[in-house]
Image: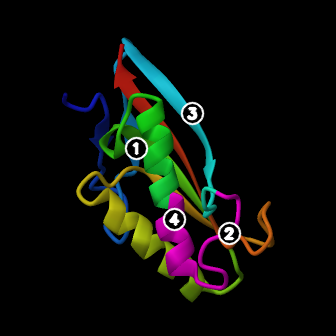
Amino acid sequence: MPSAVTLIRSHQLSSAAQYAYAASVPANTRLIFLAGSCPLNEDGSTAGIGDYRVQAEKAIENMRLALEAAGAEIEDVVSTRVLVASSQQADLVTAWEVVREAFGNHDVPSTLMGVTVLGYDNQLVEVEAIAAVPE
């Protein structure tokens, strides 16, 4: 089924961004608001302690499972927010590269943020998302 999401680009904004600047969905669309996907294993332990890349991969894996449970897939995501517990830009970029790769050509509007701490022990990455599917 084709995605209900339309990515919007502007030639008046910087081309340095690796994502669309906006997205829209039609009126007959069901929005899905996902909790932040954390790098947690099924047993509740934190995956990839100390490794931004592994934690971003696990967060994306868990986001895909949450999307599936809601009847959606990654191509239905409208926007994301990527939270990285670090003040080092290189750590943010490491997590971002994983997220960017997971989304491929579906480069949704996204915000990448460095934060001081996240909710679980040893957690370094969290990915929030909003998705939309036709009703």
Earlier-in-chain disc, 2 versus 1: 1
**In the image shown, does 98 or 28 lie closer to the viewer?**
98
Mark 4 burial class by Cα count in 10 Å: few <14, some 14-19, many 20+: many
Earlier-in-chain disc, 4 versus 1: 1
Q: Position of residue 55 (x, y in %)?
A: 56, 72
Vertical position of residue 116 compared to residue 50: above or below: above
> Does the segment drawn in magenta span residue 27?
no
Amino acid of disc 4:
Lys
Relative to 90, is 107 on the left or the right? Answer: left
Circle 1 SS class: strand
Amino acid of disc 2:
Thr
Between marks 3 and 4, how big is the CA–CA gap? 19 Å
Vertical position of residue 130 compared to residue 135: above or below: below
Q: Position of residue 131 (x, y in %)?
A: 44, 35
Between marks 2 and 1, how big is the CA–CA gap? 32 Å
Examine the image and state in which quarter residue 59 appears. Answer: bottom right
Circle 1 sits on which residue? 22
Amino acid of disc 3:
Phe
Q: Residue at x 38, y 33 (%)?
A: 72
Q: Which mark is residue 33?
A: 3
Earlier-in-chain disc, 4 versus 2: 2
Q: Are marks 3 and 2 in contact (CB under 8 Å)?
A: no
Earlier-in-chain disc, 3 versus 2: 3
Circle 3 SS class: strand
Residue span colored magenta: 43-59
Circle 4 sits on which residue? 58
Mark 1 burial class by Cα count in 10 Å: few <14, some 14-19, many 20+: some
Between marks 4 and 1, how big is the CA–CA gap? 26 Å
**In the image shown, does 32 or 47 lie closer to the viewer?**
47
